[in-house]
Amino acid sequence: MKKTIKMAAMIMAGAVVLAACNSGKFKDAGNGLSYKFEKQNKSAQQVQEGDVLVGEMTVKFDTTQTFTNVGHADRILQADPSFFLYDALVMMHIGDKAVLAYEADSLAKFLQPNQMPPYYEKGKGMKIYYEISLQDIVTKEELEEEQNNYIAEMKERQENEPAAIEAYVRDNNITVKPNDKGVYVIVKKRGNGAKVTAGRTVAMNYTGRLLDGTMFDSSVESNAIQGGLQQPGRTYEPLTYVVGQMRLIPGWEESVMGMPEGTVMQVVMPSAQAYGPQGAGKDIPPYSPLVFDIEIVSVK
């Protein structure tokens, strides 16, 4: 049965390089898929439907390498029946080293022309090679348990958020009332320059923290150094943007609107006015209230 290409984006994601793609003989698995094993460990745990493979992988499109994580094992692929490598993945055991090959022309049938690499040539017999070293397996059951635990943790974070904000406000002696979105705007110094309004170009220094004080970003180098965030090569300067033309988190955008140049303020916002249930990268978890110290440097 022909596999659908639901996971076609995984062309550029991968497993470990264990042997040259042109050495040894490949076995045909049908539907454009072939494979060869450099090492087999048939007595070990075998991949089952829904399992996630953990290991090292290198992906090559014909002779061009597109991905590698050799040197550090990651979760690389999932044995989903709709994935075009599925029939070969479920042959693998922990400790196996294999090279899986898929015909580029077969893949191209399921993708738009601009989704194929620019060096792809139809009818040239090109293949995509996945060189995989399987080191561990996360079973379908373990994955479901992880997901259930994550859902429970996120629910707890969401439920605890209002109390966490209340505690922060109390512990930091914040006396202003929140606006109708639950955002606290504490003006520490009010400027007397032009006001922030739509269409104006503004420059603002800022430092962002979680409620526990963990800093996740700053435009001020001394603060970044203090927070352990200094990035070599980064230019530390005020954030400059045209009001209304740059999409910022609502808690920031609405809080600075109408504030005059020279204002120094602090904004405490619930996650619904920041990055919500998604969070942002590794530094801002889901359902994280944020605290921003902002200085409006200029309004033009």
Image (cartoon, helix red, strand yellow):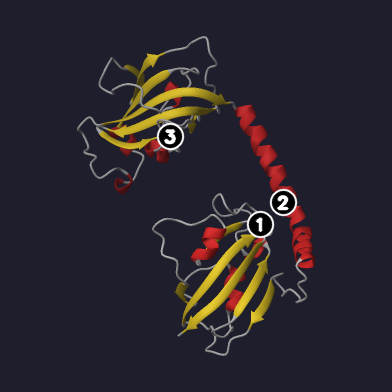
Most foreground residue, 51 or 200: 200
* Residue at position x 42%, y 22% in the image: 88
Question: Residue 172's spot in the image, x, y percent?
Answer: 75, 67
**Looking at the image, which residue is at 46% across and 23% down?**
134
User: Earlier along the polypeptide chain: callout 2 or callout 3?
Assistant: 3
Marks 3 and 2: in contact by CB < 8 Å? no
Q: Amino acid at mark 2?
A: Arg
Give left or right: position of 251 versus 135: right
Which marked residue is nearer to the observer: mark 1 or mark 3?
1
Secondary structure beneath dot 2 equals helix
Residue at screen point 73% across, 73% down: 178
SS of the residue under disc 3? loop
Real-space Cα distance between discs 2 and 1? 8 Å
Residue 76, x across and y down, in percent: 47, 33
Mark 1 and mark 3 residues within 8 Å of each other at the beta carbon: no
Q: Is 62 above or below relative to 36? A: below
Determine whether label 2 and label 1 are within 8 Å by CB.
Answer: yes
Q: Residues within 10 Å of mark 1 (few under 14, many from 20)?
A: many
Q: How dense is the environment of label 3, judged by Cα within 10 Å: few (below 14), some, or many (20 and up)?
A: few
Direction from residue 163 to residue 71 in the image, left or right: left
Examine the image and state in which quarter residue 279 appears. Answer: bottom right
Q: Residue under label 3, please give it.
A: 4
Amino acid type at image mark 1: Ser
Question: Mark 2 or 1 closer to N-term?
Answer: 2
Q: What residue sits right under mark 2 in the picture?
A: 157
Residue carrying label 1: 288
| Residue type pointed to by label 3 | Thr
